[in-house]
Image (cartoon, grey):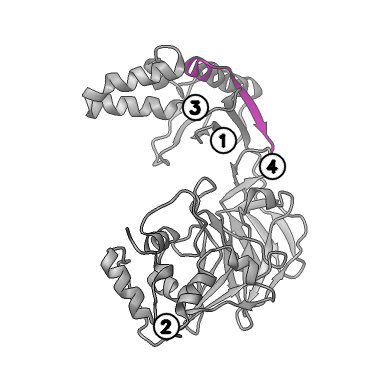
Amino acid sequence: MTTPISSLQLKSIDDFDDVCEFRAYKNENFEIIKSDFSKQLTKTVEKFQYAKVLHQLATDNPTNLTNPYWQWIVACNLSPDNIEIIMNGDFSYYSQAFWGMERMGQTRTLLADGREIWIGGEFEDYYDPQFFIYNDVIVKHPNGDIEIYGYPLDIFPATDFHSATLIDNKIWLIGSLGYQEQRQYKQTQVFTLDIDTYQIQAVKTKNSMGLIYKHTADYQDGKIVLSGGYKIQDKDAPIIEQINKWTLDLQTLTWKNCTNYQWQIFMIKRADNSYFSLWDFDNALFDKKYNKDNFAIAVQKLEEKLGIAPNFELFANLYNVPLEHSIDKSELEYNENAIFINEVRVRYVDNGRNICVYVEGNLPQNQLAILQEDLIDKLTILENSPCVIEKIRE
């Protein structure tokens, strides 16, 4: 049985090095600052091992939460999964989330003086026991020093997939996906971080585009220019692409839609809101081409799932619409297909539980209706289950 690290008498960072070396879970970039730490390092581990303490201990704006244990994690770039193995010797689906690195949706900003500012981010997703969205600020100095700051949640909420734009002595933090129960759908989240004091301030803006994340942002002529990413319009709405370019005037703090594209966007989903089986069709065809021994098994599983024999011919013609069109031969994402109708690009995005269709322009209403009805009918047959349409307001 592996001895949990929290029960070991760790007197210095070298002891951590020995434990990691022995268990062979050392990160490739395992560079530890060799120095003498407090003999109470074990107590430091116990106090700071779980991510939730980030919210429990932060009382000021900012709260300096720098400690040798977190510094070690940052220096080694250890994920919560790495930490769990080191702490407990194995994974557990019942453990609490450990504070760690290797986060998604974390921004990293390099300052002129050589400091790096890392902000927020998340680890894993809601289904994982290590899922956690952070609201901390990590400062890496050119000499290797590391500082970590926390904030009360009512000052700076858990933030991920935001943008970070450096302007003078402030980093402008725009957007966030955040925890589902804490999302503000009608207001775009905007904060500033003072790079001298590390204080965070909320910024109230006008004419907001709503919740946005995974976008890009740049500073141009007194404005922050934002493009791309995704948006969610309300708690029951699907995730859709943010198609327009917006600017935030830093004098008036007003958002402006600079493109105002009038795309026709709709979504097809199963009436029971279950996942489509299109991925299973793809996998079966892959087996037919590359692993023929498994093809019969894949077909049998698909038939059991659908309740009917899978219609591979219909699947191959899912996006072959009964309108004059051409195939978009440009490089697309793995879950995308696209065609052109009347020189208007029509892009299909398979999101697993729905297919979102972006008509990147305007088709006549009769053609749009044919496009929609054709996809509904084909998916209903393929899935052996009723499918419905949801029109989306951009």
* Element type at mark 4: loop
* Residue 235 numbered tag: 4
Distance from the alpha carbon under mark 2 to that under mark 3: 49 Å
* Residue 271 numbered tag: none
Residue 34, x across and y down, in percent: 35, 84
Please give the residue where the numbered disc 1 appears in the rendered image.
Answer: 358
Residue 381, magenta (yes or no)? yes
Residues at discs 3 and 4 in contact (Cβ within 8 Å): no
Distance from the alpha carbon under mark 1 to that under mark 3: 19 Å
Whether residue 288 is visible here, answered yes or no, is yes
Residue 197, magenta (yes or no)? no
Distance from the alpha carbon under mark 4 to that under mark 2: 43 Å
Pointer 2 local density, CA inside 10 Å: few below 14, some 14–19, many at least 20: few
Q: Tell which circle, 3 or 4, labels the residue nearer the N-terminal end.
A: 4
Please give the residue where the numbered disc 2 appears in the rendered image.
Answer: 144
Residues at discs 2 and 1 in contact (Cβ within 8 Å): no
Camera-nearest label, 2 or 1: 2
Q: Amino acid at mark 1?
A: Tyr
* Element type at mark 3: loop
279 or 209, which is in the foreground?
279
Q: Amino acid at mark 4?
A: Lys
Distance from the alpha carbon under mark 2 to that under mark 1: 47 Å
349 or 299, which is in the foreground?
299
Q: Tell which circle, 1 or 3, labels the residue nearer the N-terminal end.
A: 3
The magenta stretch spans which residues?
Answer: 379-394
Task: Using the rendered view, name the quadrant where residue 16 is placed.
Answer: bottom left
Distance from the alpha carbon under mark 3 to that under mark 4: 22 Å
* Residue 276 numbered tag: 3
Q: Amino acid at mark 2?
A: Gly
Pointer 1 local density, CA inside 10 Å: few below 14, some 14–19, many at least 20: many
Q: Tell which circle, 2 or 3, labels the residue nearer the N-terminal end.
A: 2
